[in-house]
Image: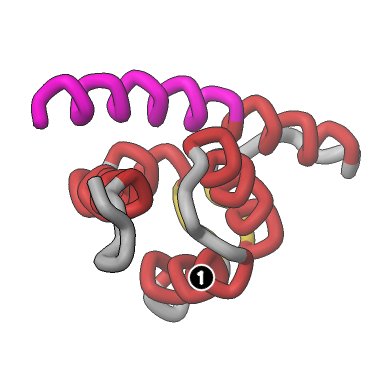
Amino acid sequence: DGEFVNSFERALEHAADGAAVSLMQRATARGEKFVPEVDRSDFVAAVGLMASQLRLPLGTDNIHQLFDAVAAGNTHVHFEDFVDAPSTRYYLLQLADASRAPGPDVEA
């Protein structure tokens, strides 16, 4: 429904902003300058943070697989492009929608 989608979009923006701040802090802690292209470990940490904030059923193994799919053989992913991609937003929205739906053995 439209209200759920709008609410999720706002929550996703908030979670993505928090993940970006986390990525900047991780780079600073390593004594590096932040760049938007992140490696696997930073991607897994940032997407894991987003999934936690959004209460998505997305475990570390799933996030590693997501990195492999997005990176397409590369060692880095442009994090903002990943977050802004319509396919990412659709995928995360579908996860959120599925996680709120009652299962087949649950009466609504």
In the picture of the structure, the residue carrying the numbered disc 1 is: 62
Q: In this view, does 59 lie above or below 94?
A: below
**The N terminus lies in which quarter of the figure?**
top left
Q: Residue furthest front?
A: 107
Q: Tell whether 2 sits left or right of 27.
A: left
Give the camera-side residue of 104 and 14.
104
Q: Tell me which segment is drawn in magenta.
A: 1-18
- The x, y position of residue 90, in whole percent, is 21, 48
Q: Which amino acid does label 1 sit on?
A: Asn
Q: In this view, does 64 lie above or below 49?
A: below
Q: In which quarter of the image is residue 18?
A: top right
Q: Residue furthest bottom?
A: 73
Q: In which quarter of the image is residue 85?
A: top left
- Is 105 in the magenta? no
Q: Residue at x 83, y 32 (%)?
A: 28
Q: Residue at x 31, y 29 (%)?
A: 8
Q: In which quarter of the image is residue 81?
A: top left
Majority secondary structure of magenta residues? helix
Q: Tell whether 41 sits left or right of 88.
A: right
- The x, y position of residue 20, in whole percent, is 58, 31
Give the camera-side residue of 40 and 102.
102
Q: In this view, does 30 lie above or below 42?
A: above
What is the number of callouts on the image? 1
- Is 13 in the magenta? yes
Q: Residue at x 19, y 45 (%)?
A: 86
Q: Circle 1 — which element?
A: helix
Give the camera-side residue of 6 and 29.
6
- The x, y position of residue 99, in whole percent, is 37, 51
User: Few, some or many C-alpha atoms within 10 Å of disc 1 (few <14, some 14-19, many ≥20)?
Assistant: few
Q: Which residue is drawn at 56% across and 34% down?
A: 53
- The x, y position of residue 26, in whole percent, is 79, 39
